[in-house]
Amino acid sequence: MLVRPATIEDMSQVYDLLNALRMESIWATIPVTPIQPYVNAHLLMILHDPEQRLVVADREGELVGICRGTISSHEYLPGLRYLAERDLYVLPRYRGFVVGKALWGDLLAWGKAQGAYGACYGKITRLTEKRCVEEVMWRVFDQEPIHA
């Protein structure tokens, strides 16, 4: 399995993975259907934005996971740049095989190389049949993660 930056050729599979993420999250309960041309246009903007990174886990041409992050500036501390995780998804049949860790590790290394102070991300703390409880975490690079 190869973790690599997404390309234009990946957009159809990326869209499918994002839709699968939506269907497994609280967003599935909201009666709004994504518009694929709009999502694809947005994904193309992400690919060309130096402040964003979208990586995929590629298993012989099949994308089995995605991870996206943005370099953001703190609203009240403009000099504090941090990595904000936006999407992290791995197909159910590939969970438990460190695919998510590999994707997140790539994003963390990229964020650190971009000069980010740390990372803000969601951590699933409880999963039930109908609901996912996510906790916001804050991690200063080279330190243990803490609750935000």
Image (cartoon, rainbow, N blue to C red):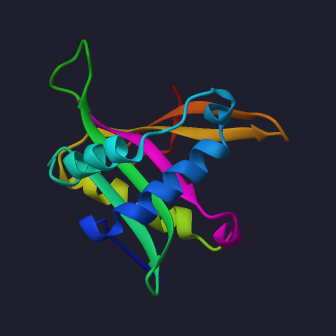
**Left or right of 12: which side holds 75?**
left
Q: Is residue 46 above or below residue 56?
A: above
- Is the residue 57 above or below the residue 22 in the image? below
Residue 39 position by quadrant: top left
Q: Is residue 85 magenta?
A: yes
Q: Is residue 78 left or right of residue 31?
A: left
Residue sitting at 70 percent across and 71 percent down?
93
* Position in image of residue 41 (x %, y %): 26, 46
Task: Give the mark count.
Answer: 0
Front residue of 27/105: it is 27
Q: Nearer the viewer, residue 4 or 44?
A: 44
Most distant residue in the bottom direction: 60
Does the magenta segment cover residue 146? no
Q: Is residue 102 above or below residue 50?
A: below
Q: Name the residue located 51 percent from the left edge and 41 percent from the top edge.
A: 145
Residue 107, quarter of picture: bottom left
Query: Along the line of sight, which residue is nearer the eye, 42 or 114?
Result: 42
Q: Position of residue 78 (x, y in %)?
A: 17, 20
Res 78 visible: yes
Give the farthest residue toward the right.
129
**Range covered by the magenta-colored residues:** 81-96
